[in-house]
Image (spheres, coloured by chain):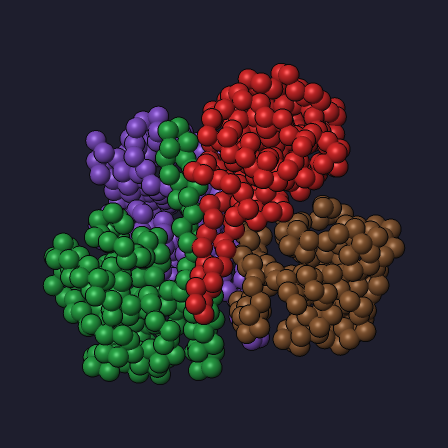
Chain colours: A purple, B brown, C red, D green
Amino acid sequence: MLNDEEFLRGNVPMTKREIRTLTLAAARLDVDSVVADVGAGTGSITIEAARLAHGGKVFAIERNAAAIELIRRNIEKFSVGNVEIICAAAPDGLASLPALDAAIIGGSGGRLNAILDALFDKLKTGGRLVLNAITLQTATTALEYLRARALPYDAFQVQITRLERVGRYDMAKALNPVWIIAATKEV
Amino acid sequence: MLNDEEFLRGNVPMTKREIRTLTLAAARLDVDSVVADVGAGTGSITIEAARLAHGGKVFAIERNAAAIELIRRNIEKFSVGNVEIICAAAPDGLASLPALDAAIIGGSGGRLNAILDALFDKLKTGGRLVLNAITLQTATTALEYLRARALPYDAFQVQITRLERVGRYDMAKALNPVWIIAATKEV
Amino acid sequence: MLNDEEFLRGNVPMTKREIRTLTLAAARLDVDSVVADVGAGTGSITIEAARLAHGGKVFAIERNAAAIELIRRNIEKFSVGNVEIICAAAPDGLASLPALDAAIIGGSGGRLNAILDALFDKLKTGGRLVLNAITLQTATTALEYLRARALPYDAFQVQITRLERVGRYDMAKALNPVWIIAATKEV
Amino acid sequence: MLNDEEFLRGNVPMTKREIRTLTLAAARLDVDSVVADVGAGTGSITIEAARLAHGGKVFAIERNAAAIELIRRNIEKFSVGNVEIICAAAPDGLASLPALDAAIIGGSGGRLNAILDALFDKLKTGGRLVLNAITLQTATTALEYLRARALPYDAFQVQITRLERVGRYDMAKALNPVWIIAATKEV
């Protein structure tokens, strides 16, 4: 994983390194995976996925113009050639995607059920869906969706507290917790 | 407990309400307790202690001029009449304290062992020592001190994540974790 | 607050001391408060509330026979004389309660909305409702209820990690996190 | 990463999947990495490292007989052919290791400084040291060691709370937190 400071990030919130690590591990990418990153933000997940799936392809779906510009510049900075940006508010823009090995949701703009429908439609059998939620409602809605379809899931909350060196002390500095919810498309 | 926003706080870090609640519960104050609050900061613990021990007295020890001014203004705002501010870098200023029912350490300025010596010296038998640590080293040093003197202790880390209402969502916003370490002077 | 080990507890899950402390602080009890403790479990919250509101009264509502027996024995052990046990599956049993200063929900048996309706009906103006949730769905349902009625709330998750002394080490042992949600009946 | 249930584990404590993921990410293994896993326990980190560094080698150092037997059986279960078990109480057994790309410390049996000395001696320039600590003292001792040698480090605490499906609810079940401390041998 890259360090957080390596990304250009502006004022767009970024998924922190430890969360990226756990999210991408849950996505189980191969070198040739085809991946969608919905609500790509700064593109930090997109870039890491593109490096892991360097023989595959990553579609970054993002509606915010400032974020799209950051993704473009991060793609350039890290010289990744296998990313395609889709400027749309998901689920818009998802219908044109090819079959996916993995879909990662970092942001849903309030249309989570429709996004999940569209992504499960595109996922191959055995494909992975991974969602990062920073609100209680998003986590609950995602779990409800998966339960309603009898899809088994793994779900956990991760709370990272960094130890920041300050003189001869290490101060405990909390990152905001994230719920990571993952499921496999079984049939 | 008061709400955090009720305190005047400037740029001085303040012990948050949930931490104040657990800290003061560990101090087991009575209405007539005599209390020292070392490293009083904004005075939030001082004020709460003074309200709980309204028939007793609270000594707020603080070295930082801006913090002392905040404590003064918070005393005035909450009209508490049983606080005495001691402008000193602890353990300086502790020798003149009367016998204490409870001592709370919010900040130690790197002289923790000497502060603990001075406070245990002043604590009555059965008196309570409660320390809030935000660094790994302060927590470890305090535990080492208590172990070396065979003082039983209760110690835990508390991590509060507030749910902040944002539109129709509740976002998980972490406060920095704090170690709360408490011991009783037994003899 | 009492120590966890002081309570008789059998196999019934018990609200841990730090959580009891924060829950009862949120309930803002006075010495003469009238309180309902719904889903009282071992009675640990009931007993603490009864000691704080020693001039008031606490109604412990619980449906489980083993738990009711534990509450009885804890009442006896701590010699509290101001508790009445109501053997019922809430919201059953709530209609006969008097006007309440505070209502605490530790368990809802899946009928949370009806319980909240019944309790807000009984709460005096200015009365406090405090809920402890250990599942995502209970927390979300409670927040939805409060939002739908435009009731302002304070909500946070608390994660306690106890430091357990093992030889010369202090091991970090996590308690399960709890969401604490509190609101005031305003009119 | 493998699921926790896939490992044979007996009564030996096991590093949980999310922690393994973050630990191995911090170790930055290549397919041909030479790795030491000190205090290998059930061998869960050893097995994962052996699968990531399938063209390299993993040395599992462990002193406990029951744990060694578990490592043997897990090696067999997962058919990894690039692990060598060293039955010794580290730092014993470390002197005979070849040059290392990464060293992971899961347990130190109270001899952490000597283990760190031995491992930094074996690490190649650019090699990674990653330590998992479950006690405050181990974390503090490791940070002190790294500071004393002016080795930059990344350190954080990770607290995982799994959501366990219970009927129509997801219960928050905390794992014990772990401090993960990582450093690079720079010269």
Residue C165 in sight:
yes
The image shows a total of numbered marks equal to 0
The residue nearer to you, when weighing A118 against B44, is: B44
Residue B19: percent from the left, percent from the top?
63, 52
Residue B158: percent from the left, percent from the top?
55, 53
Q: Is residue D110 left or right of residue C101?
A: left
Q: Quadrant of residue C49?
A: top right
Residue C181 in sight:
no
Q: Is residue A39 left or right of residue D3?
A: right
Q: Residue drawn 26% across and 35% down? A: A185
Q: Residue drawn 64% across and 73% down? A: B112
Q: Is residue A114 left or right of residue D121?
A: right
The correct choice, above or below, for B100 with respect to C96 in the image is below
Residue A17: percent from the left, percent from the top?
42, 57
The residue nearer to you, when weighing D87 against B29, is: B29
* Quadrant location of the C terminus of chain C in the rendered image: top right
Q: Residue drawn 36% across and 35% down? A: D165
The residue nearer to you, when weighing B124 against C160, is: B124
The correct choice, above or below, for A179 with respect to B80 in the image is above
Residue B25: percent from the left, percent from the top?
66, 51
Q: Residue drawn 47% across and 76% down? A: D144
